[in-house]
Image (cartoon, helix red, strand yellow):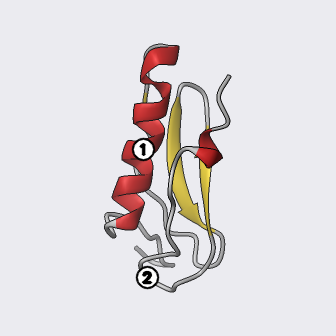
């Protein structure tokens, strides 16, 4: 299994400039800010060949500011 973190560039949070992390959950990836908690949608993959592309897509969504943020009362 490839080390995805070495193959995918993830920028600081587009909202607060905090640290970010790429998480793999089940058969998919999402990116999340470790400070404010915003995150991307879960990008699924069906097989090992699609795994890297799913990680890159999640990072691309995060890096371009396409994130979700839940605030109290929303």
> Where does the image place residue 5, in percent across and percent down from the top left?
63, 47
On screen, residue 32 above or below 70: above
Q: From the image, which quarter does the N terminus lie in? A: top right
Residue located 52% across and 84% down the image: 17
- Residue identifier under label 2: 15
On screen, residue 15 above or below 63: below
Number of callouts in the render? Answer: 2
**Residue 34 visible (yes or no):** yes
Q: Which residue is nearer to you in this view: 36 or 24?
A: 24
* Of callouts 1 and 2, the N-terminal one: 2
| Residue 19 location, quadrant | bottom right
How crowded pointer 2 is (Cα within 10 Å; few <14, some 14-19, many 20+) is rated as: some
Residue located 45% across and 78% down the image: 73
Q: Is residue 34 left or right of residue 40?
A: right
**Residue 43 visible (yes or no):** no
Q: Secondary structure at mark 1?
A: helix
> Where does the image place residue 41, in percent across and percent down from the top left?
40, 49
Residue located 37% across and 44% down the image: 57
On screen, residue 5 above or below 17: above
How crowded pointer 1 is (Cα within 10 Å; few <14, some 14-19, many 20+) is rated as: many
Q: Is residue 44 left or right of residue 27?
A: left
| Residue 20 location, quadrant | bottom right
Residue 21, numbered label: none
Q: Which residue is nearer to you in this view: 48 or 37?
A: 48
> Where does the image place residue 66, in percent across and percent down from the top left?
31, 63
- Residue identifier under label 1: 56
> Where does the image place residue 6, in percent across and percent down from the top left?
63, 47
């Amino acid at each position: 299994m490839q080390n995805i973190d070495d193959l995918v560039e993830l920028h600081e949070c587009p909202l607060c400039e905090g640290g970010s992390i790429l998480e793999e959950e089940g058969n998919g990836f999402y990116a999340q800010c470790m400070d404010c908690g915003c995150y991307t949608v879960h990008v699924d993959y069906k097989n090992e060949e699609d795994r890297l592309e799913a990680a890159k897509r999640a990072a691309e969504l995060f890096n371009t500011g396409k994130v979700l943020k839940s605030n109290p009362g929303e």
